Image (cartoon, coloured by chain):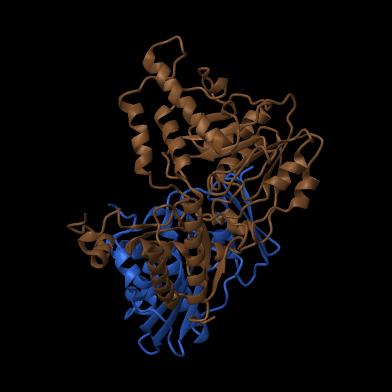
Amino acid sequence: MLKKPENQKLLYIYKIWGDKMNNNNMIYLDNSAVTRLDEKVLEAMKPYFFETYAVATSEFAYTMGIQAKEALENAREVIANSLSANSDEIVFTSGATESNNLALKGIMYNQKDKGHLIVSELEDFSVLNTAKSLEKEGYDVSYISVDSEGKLDFDELKNAVREDTVLVSIQHANQEIGTVQNIEEIAKFLDGKDIIFHTDATHSFRRIEIDVTNIPVDLITISAHTIHGPRGIGALYKRKNIKLKKIMDGGFQENNLRAGIENIPAAVGFAKAVELVTEEENKKIKKLRDLLIKKVEDQIEDVTLNGSRSDRIPQNANITFHYVEGESITLHLDMRGFAVSTGSACFSKSLEASHVILGIGGDHERAHGSIRFTFSRYNTEEDVNKVVEAIKDVVTNLREISPLGKKGSE
Amino acid sequence: MNSPYSDKVLEYFQNPKNVGELENPDGIAKEGSPACGDMVQLHLKVDEKKKTITDIKFRSYGCASNIATGSIITEMAKGRSIEEAKNITWQQAADELGGLPAVKNHCSVLAVDALKEAIRDYEEKHGLVKEQVPTTIEVIKERLKHVMNPIHGLDVLKTNLIENIELKDKIITVTVDLAEDHQFAPVVKEDIKEKLEHRWDIEDVIVKYRE
């Protein structure tokens, strides 16, 4: 609770919210960054901190270790089932970043010769910067461009494939604009070509179905942090016949692919989080997203929806409010109790505008004014109504100040 | 809970002063660009006899510190003589706001540049400017003092970020001591070009990175 506002920011929040303001009634719309943990997940995890806290041991060791091992394998099975995969095809990691590193480096380092890698230019940093790092080590990398909605240029991908192409890594859904790629089409094109296909499904996992018995994808990155699971746990689905080189030396855990003590409480929590996502929930989230887009487009002038209208993950709306800058919008919204994110350069420590908005052909102004709203289990229609009212007000005020656009001199 | 911004920055961000435009301004300036993500526009009224700034209005496109510095600069300049106003530094403006995060000091530079530019515009329109100064290495250095090194929040010259400056056939080539893939490389490049390419006797500005 806020009792004594210590500075201007708190004072402003206090004026609006009184002493009712705390993080629990803040309206959180940055669910692609991280989601709130579900209490049920925490409950499922608890015994593996306090009761069955041993490491996973072999079946010849002590009882607690065997129980821990069973819990880990049960979690693995739940996660495998959600992709229609087999348990031994799931490698637990510390999250999406590690899964992407393991997929790209694990495959490329396993080749005799330095081969060719293909990625899209809209990948998240854990794929993009891993690719750049491999490039520096002498591997050849092609970056495939996308159209104005963020959809991959499939012809460009086809043309980029060479004799020495080892791996293609194309994200399933985009982290900023939510565009969903047709991974089935890509996987089927690559199938039988002796090229490995990896997809980063961090932002689509459990929101859009992936069935590896239908889609011949070889590697999939997934994570718990986007589905109300704990942070610090993710996994890499690895089709049985695919060979990976271990990228971190140590013990022989995870089928000798990922060294280090298994994070059993987190794995159990991950599995619980996977079970808790329902089709009904995804429909509800999609409704909220569509309501927000409709309200903003109906009520605020000069806005652009970034990404695709149809091929879009249910939780994401990304909208540019022209003539105004995103950091100012997010700060004003923060003061009113809303958490959103922006592709503006000012918001980032690197002062660089979003490579995603620039990648879909947007100019810097479009990137600087872009706001990402991402929904979760805990959002309601009331949240949408409130944030639209707030942003309408904030954008109007900022446009009054702006030298750009209709209100200004230009 | 700590905000990277001072209370004063937040206060001006919420309630900026002197927003808008003037009818028949005596001097105008627009510094920055939408591409860079920050822009300040200033309108001045100057008392012709006393040479004092009688009224000043601003508009801003940018982040909280951009809006706050745009606002504070109008208050600092109002009532002052144009000679006094010319001498306001970005550091003074930042201090007046209780300081800025290092990575945001360029906002203050932009606001101060806009004020100088608006005064120059007034002087030019009222026949107060001597001949246009030809671009020399010294002039380039003077301009580069207004480009921030975002790593330190100080200008690129003071922080030895500039390796070399060349001026040949109306083309300026500036070599920056940053690797091409450094996180700030594109920003520094954009800023340098912005400060130099509008000079009357310059055709192109090339920014090179460390080999």
Residue at the image position 51 percent from the left and 22 percent from the top? A259
* Chain B: colour as depicted: blue
- Res. B105 image quadrant: bottom left
Residue at the image position 57 percent from the left and 75 percent from the top? B132
Chain in brown colour: A
x, y percent for residue A91: 55, 29
Residue at the image position 75 percent from the left and 51 percent from the top? A154
Can residue A343 be seen in this snapshot? no
Residue at the image position 38 percent from the left and 69 percent from the top? A390
* Total numbered labels placed on residues in the image: 0
Q: Residue furthest front?
A: A280
Instruction: From the viewer's perspective, tell me whether residue A283 is left or right of residue A401.
Output: right
x, y percent for residue B138: 55, 60
Can residue B47 be seen in this snapshot? yes
- Name the one closer to the observer, A270 or B32: A270
In the image, residue B82 sits, relative to residue B33, either above or below, namely below
Q: Residue furthest left?
A: A4
If the image is split into quadrants, where does the C terminus of chain B sit? top right
- Name the one closer to the observer, B117 or A364: A364
x, y percent for residue B52: 36, 83
In the image, residue A74 sits, relative to residue B28, either above or below, namely above
- Name the one closer to the observer, A319 or B172: A319
x, y percent for residue A197: 69, 38
- Name the one closer to the observer, A215 or B188: A215
Instruction: From the viewer's perspective, tell me whether residue B23 is left or right of residue A352.
Output: left
Q: Residue furthest top?
A: A60
